[in-house]
Image (cartoon, rainbow, N blue to C red):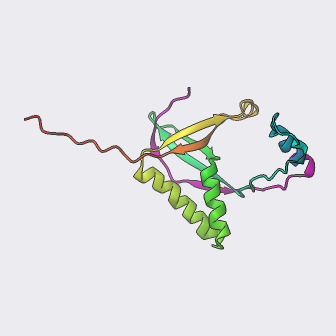
Amino acid sequence: MLRFSATNFLALTLKKQDTKKLTHVEKMKFTNANRSLFDEDSSAMDFISMPEIPYKFKLPFLDDSGKRSSMSIIDWEISQLYLNLKKSGKSEAIVLQKVKEKLEGFIEKNDLYLFLGTMRQMHSHVNNPYTIIGLFYPPKAKHYQGTLF
């Protein structure tokens, strides 16, 4: 299990990225990968993929030794927040600002724990193959020092 301690989370960064439409062949690959052995007619199953988000969300932080690192966030909850705000008709700038405020609010008001994941193909060509696949943000623990006497 990878364990590190981020002592200081920095401002979230957003980077525009190209999104591509899946071809019919690519959709069928996903469909075949998601088939169940117990479906009677799994060939009739329609595949609906989640729309790609046109931004990459990255969370930079400093670790205990002061080294700066940054990891991409591919958490479903953040992607869905972006899509819901977009669906509400808000401008792109407002949507991005609200996503940024939400993430930075998690950092400021809560203890933030990161669930990390990796893909094998990333290990050969990047320094840090880990990405943030989930966030856990319980309220900050309140420690009260009682009197001794």
Residue 141's x, y, as percent?
34, 43
* Residue shown at the point (56%, 65%) measured from the top left: 97
Residue 33 position by quadrant: top right
Q: Closer to the camera, 42 or 115?
A: 42
Percent position of residue 95, x then y: 61, 66
* Closest to the observer, 11 or 49: 49
Residue 5: x and y, percent? 46, 35
Where is 109 relative to 36, above or below? below
Give 5 or 38, whichever is nearer the viewer.
Answer: 38
Q: Which residues are magenta?
A: 1-26
Confirm whether the magenta stretch covers residue 18: yes
Q: Residue 79: horizontal and vertical position, in percent?
A: 65, 54
* Residue lying at 64% horizontally and 63% vertically, measured from the top left: 84
Whether residue 147 is situated above or below residue 85 in the rendered picture: above
| Residue 128 seen by the camera | no
Q: Residue at x 74, y 33 (%)?
A: 125
Residue at image point 67% right, 68% down? 87
* Direction from residue 141 to residue 86 in the image, left or right: right
Q: Residue furthest left?
A: 149
Q: Residue furthest right?
A: 25
- What is the number of callouts on the image? 0
Residue 92: quarter of image: bottom right
Image quarter where the N terminus lies is top right
Compared to residue 1, the image places residue 108 above or below, namely below
Is 58 left, or right, of 22 in this rendering? left
Q: Magenta stretch: residue 84 in it?
A: no
